Each structure stands twice: as C-alpha cells, then as structure tokens.
Image: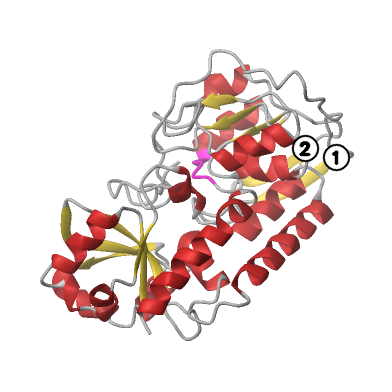
Amino acid sequence: MSVRPLFATLAVAGTVLALASCASDTAAETPQADSTCTPAEAPTVESDVTVEHALGTTTIPAGASRVASVGWGNQDVALALGFAPVGADDQTWSMTGDDGLGLYDWTLDGYAALCADEPVIFDTTDGVDFEAIADAAPDVILAAYSGLTEDDYATLSKIAPTVAYPDIPWYTPWREAIQLDADALGKSAEGEALVADLDTQIADASADITSFEGKKAAFFYVNPADLSTISIYATGDSRTAFLGDLGFDAPQFAVDTSESGAFYADIAAENADILSDVDVFVMYGDDDLVKAFQADPLWSTLDAVKNGAIVTMGSGDALSGSVTPTALSIPWMLDTYVGMLDDAASLAE
C-alpha cells in the first residue's frame, strides 16, 4: 500500500503520503496451504459485537469467521488473533516478494503459522476492489487503517459488516488499529494483550541503546529526482510516531505539523534550516539518495546530513513496508531497524 500504507506519491494529499501501494494482479484462485500442515479450527466471533468508528456503527454477528481486509495491515491483526483472512488488499508497492502474491513476508509467515490458504488479493489500482471483495464472501471487513470514503463504506457495508478507521483516513496509530480490528472480531482482551506484548518487544529491543537519548528523528519522503522539496511526516503519522516509541524525540517541525492537523508538510531546500534540530533522518531510498543529499548545497548544510546520520529503508521491498508498523511487521523488522537507527544516531553524537 504504499505511503498511501508505504506509501506516498505526493500526488494526492491524503493518500500520497499516507501509504503507497502499487497494485498486484488479483489472484485467480486462492493458493492452497502446505498439505503437510494441519490447520487449526477456524475461530469465529463468539457473540454479536457492535463497534463505533468514524463512518458509523457496525454490528458483527455471532458466528462470523470469514474476514476480508481493506487498507494497510488489518490482515495482520486478524492473523495475530488466529483468523486467516480470505482476502486482503495488495500490500506491496511493487511485485518484489518471492511469489509476487502482493503480501510482505511477515503476513505470509502469519498464514503459514496458521496452516491457512493464502488469500485472494484485492487489486488497489483503481481504489477499492468491490467485485473481488464480494466474490470472497466475507462475514466482516476490517479497515481500521484505511482511507475509505463514505461511498466506499456504504458499498462495502452491503457486502458485509465493515469497520472503518476511528477518526481520520490513513491516520490510525498502530495500537488503535490493532484494538479496533480486535474489537470487531470479538477479541478485545486479546487485542489489548497483543498491544502489550508488542510494547514489551519494543522496550526490550531498545533497552540497551543509549544513542537515541536526547536525539530527534523523523521520517521523510524524498523524491530522489527532485531535492528542491522534501516532506516530513508529522508526529501523528505511524512512521514518525514509531521512532518515538523507540525513544527518539520529535523535531519541532514534525510537532508543529501535527498540531496544524496535517500528517505531513513540505520543506523547500532553501528553508533547510527549519530542520536544523533533526539528528537522524529516516526515509525511503538507498545509498545513492544519501550521496545526493550530502552533495546538495542546501541540504548539506544540516549537521545530520554532513554526519551521514541518514537511514534509508529501501523502496518497495519488505523492509520499506515494515516501517509503517503492523501487528506482524513490528517483530519482523524490530531488531534490524533498531540496529540501523543506532548506527545513524551514533554518527550524530
């Protein structure tokens, strides 16, 4: 999903920098699970559940078991709670996975752990893939982290009870996304336990790291072909917010951007000094982008850029997808991400 959930193409504010997803072809047939693996009995929603969200109030009936996932990362919550979604939105920017299915490694691992058939993948090229979702015959549609419009929600609700985001499209903190999806599956207590476990993993992974203390970091979107302007994700965006989870402080401009109600803001190169308090830059891209930044006459005036305190997360591969945190991507990427950030933060000292 890409900033639209990896995700951003700076073309349409709201989905551009919200998660970016290149579409994959919808699977013609659902791949079969490993025949040597014995799936557990599929769970069901044990009693009627009513959930409030930004687009309405939804009741999921007892006995619901077939889950569809729309948006970013909602399928991972279901998998973590024992439900194997029958269908999910394409999660990848590009077909860089081993099998080209349209799911990243941690999600595929989740299906394998449940010995479950892989899902039908909904094509997100033109928005919500209503026809494929209907064909999957879900009992409930999870969209706690998504960009559904009111019209999208109305159409999906005719297919199955649908649970949208709690407040703002593409702006649901990962903890809230987990809890809302868990509530929809009648697993509120299990959702709370899942969040608590992930918080423990985060604390453990960063416990011995001293380089983050007193340092300011944020996540950025940079077009390598045009360094005249870059974009910073606000503190409310899950990417910059996750840096806070790990122990970084937020630069003032990221805080100001959140307080303005925006989830990202553009910074022109001639105003680079606005980011003078940033100790660590995190962004999609590769080493060539770092070299370009350091060669730029304006961005190179920043101490973090001079010092090379820049973490690049790739573009479209699993690592780049993992930093928009989900229930399953957090443990998958945590140690690697903390190590990369530690290396960069050490350069800022």
**Magenta-drawn stretch, dominant element (helix, strand or loop):** loop
Q: Position of residue 162 (x, y in %)?
A: 65, 37
**Cα–Cα span, label 2 and label 1:** 6 Å
Closer to us: 288 or 118: 288
In the rendered view, tell whether residue 187 sits above or below residue 125. Answer: below
When asked about the image quadrant of residue 272, the answer is bottom left
Give, as a three-letter code, the residue at label 1.
Answer: Asp
Q: Amino acid at mark 2?
A: Ile
Query: Which secondary structure lies at badge 2?
Result: strand
Q: In the rendered view, would you say 254 is above or below 143?
A: below
For the point 34% across and 78% down, the residue is 278
Q: Position of residue 195 (x, y in %)?
A: 71, 60
Check disc 1 and report the residue beneath it.
48
Q: Which residues lie in the magenta part?
A: 146-150
Residue of label 2: 60
Q: Are marks 2 and 1 in contact (CB under 8 Å)?
A: yes
Q: Is residue 116 left or right of residue 269?
A: right
Q: Compared to 257, does 184 lie above or below?
A: above
Q: Quadrant of the C terminus?
A: bottom left
Horizontal placement of 65 versus 335: left or right? right
Circle 2: is it few (<14), some (14-19), or many (20+) Cα within 10 Å?
Answer: many
